[in-house]
Image (cartoon, rainbow, N blue to C red):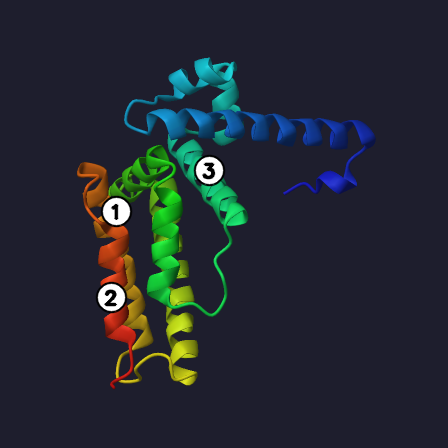
Amino acid sequence: MTDPSAAGPRSRGSYAKGLARRQEILDAAIDVFAARGAERTSLRAIAEQVGVTHAALIHHFGSLERLLVEVYLESARRLEREEPTPEGISPVESMRRSAQRNRRVPGMVQLYTTLVAAALESDRPAATAFASERFAGIRATLAEQVREGQAAGRFRTDIGPEQVAALVVAASDGLQTQWLLDPSVDQVGALALLETLLAPPR
């Protein structure tokens, strides 16, 4: 890959403008998805809403699938910056806080669910990579939280950290899907019940 820093002033300027334009498109696309979700949003519809050509979107993102992934990742980064996850909390509390943040942008929750469903298809490499990497990363983070809690005496020690992490992710995503179908589902309250699995014996 060519290093932009090794190019001349004009090349560096073009590269910087390209990055800025890509971010502008991404910012506008996030607003579109937040309002409309993924189901009713095509690449051409996004291009019209953003004010660029269909070819420009393809140039910057390659495909609708890649754009969907980038939109979700950027939205998640923004939510985390606005409300960072505190250190030293339980894995269930971590996912509960995430669920609360996500409730503010139901269009992004729908987008996430769409990406995970697409990841199960053989011809969706961007979605498959996104979902696989996300699940692996979250499981690793949650498992480490369990280990830290066990060492500090906050969590029971007769349960496997990796299994707890997988269970918490499954519960969180499953409850999120139920909430999309029925907003009356108490996603946050149901997640709180999982804390009893981690509490040490009294």
Q: Which residue is drawn at 67% across and 40% down?
A: 2
The quadrant of the picture occupied by the C terminus is bottom left
Image: 146 above or below 169:
below
Amino acid tagged 2 = Leu
Q: Can residue 171 be seen in this view?
A: no
- In the rendered image, which quarter is residue 135 located in? bottom left
Give the CA distance from mark 3 to mark 2.
31 Å
Q: Which of 158 and 17 is in front in this view?
A: 158
Mark seen at residue 176: 1
Quadrant hosting residue 23: top right
Q: Which mark is residue 4?
A: none
Dot 3 or dot 2, earlier in sequence: 3
Secondary structure beneath disc 1? helix
Q: Is residue 122 left or right of residue 144?
A: left
Tag 3 or tag 1, which sits nearer the N-term? 3
Q: Residue at x 42, y 24 (%)?
A: 32
- The residue under label 3 is 70
